[in-house]
Amino acid sequence: MADDHNNTPGNDGSLPPSLLPYDQWLEEAYRDVMLKALEHVSREGLAGEHHFYLTFRTDLSGVQIPDRLRAQYPHEMTIVLQHQFWDLNVDRDAGIVSVGLSFGGVGSILVIPVRAITGFADPSIHFNLHFEVMEDEEPAPTDHMPADAGEHAEAQGDSSSQVVSLDAFRRKGPSPA
C-alpha cells in the first residue's frame, strides 16, 4: 500500500496538500526575524549602511497615523527608518511597533500593529520579506489620529522621512537558491 502523505509529486506534478501548517510557521518565523531586527535597532541603533523599509496597511484597525497621512495613503504606506527617527519600540505583548518620524517638518508617532505589516526590507544587503495580512482582518479606518496628535516638539528635519514604493522588493522569504 502506497503512502499518501509523502513528498513525491502526484501524476499531475503537484505536491499533495500538507497536513502541517508550514506556511503559517514560516510566516511567523519571518515576522520574528523582522521584530528581532527592529528590537536590535531600538536598543543599538542602525549600524553601517543598514536601513529599513517598513510597509504596512493603513486601513486596518489599530493603525494609528495622522489623518493627513491616512488621506494620502488610504490603503498602504512605506516608511524609511534611516537617519531621523526616534522612539522605535516593539511591544510583542501588544503586537505593535511604534516609531517617531517627521513628515513635512511635523513629527508624529506612528503605531503599527505587527499584523498590519506587509513588507520589511533592508536594502543595504538586499534583504526583504513580504507578509500576508490575515484573511479575517477587515479594513477599519476608525483609529484616526488628529493632525497635531503625537507631534514631536521641534521635530528633527524630514530629509530622510520618505514614503517609497516597495514593488521591487516584493517577495516572500529568502532568495531562491
Image (tube, helix red, strand yellow):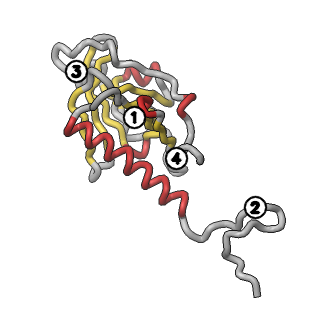
- Determine if residue 57 is in view: no
Q: Label 3: how many residues lie within 10 Å, few (<14), some (14-19) or many (20+)?
A: some
Find numbered disc 4 in the image and state the secondary structure of the residue it sits on. loop
Q: Label 1: how many residues lie within 10 Å, few (<14), some (14-19) or many (20+)?
A: few
- Cα–Cα gap, marks 4 and 3: 35 Å
Say which residue appears at 42% left-offset and 24% top-offset: 70
Q: Is residue 63 left or right of residue 8?
A: left
> Which residue position holds label 4?
173
Say which residue appears at 38% left-offset and 48% top-offset: 33
Q: Which circle's residue, 2 or 4, is located before the other in the chain?
A: 2
Q: Which amino acid does label 3 sit on?
A: Glu
Find numbered disc 1 in the image and state the secondary structure of the residue it sits on. loop
Find numbered disc 2 in the image and state the secondary structure of the residue it sits on. loop
The total number of labels drawn is: 4
- Cα–Cα gap, marks 2 and 3: 53 Å
Between circles 2 and 1, the one closer to the viewer is 2
Q: Nearer the viewer, residue 76 or 30?
A: 30
Q: Up-down: is 82 above or below 37?
A: above
Q: Nearer the viewer, residue 31 or 111?
A: 31
- Determine if residue 38 is in view: yes
> Which residue position holds label 3?
151
Q: Which circle's residue, 1 or 4, is located before the other in the chain?
A: 1
What percent of the width, then of the height, locates residue 1? Answer: 76, 88
Look at the numbered discs 1 and 3 and tell me whether their residues touch, using CB distance below 8 Å: no
What percent of the width, then of the height, locates residue 6? Answer: 67, 74
> Which residue position holds label 1?
142
Q: What residue type is labelled 4?
A: Gly
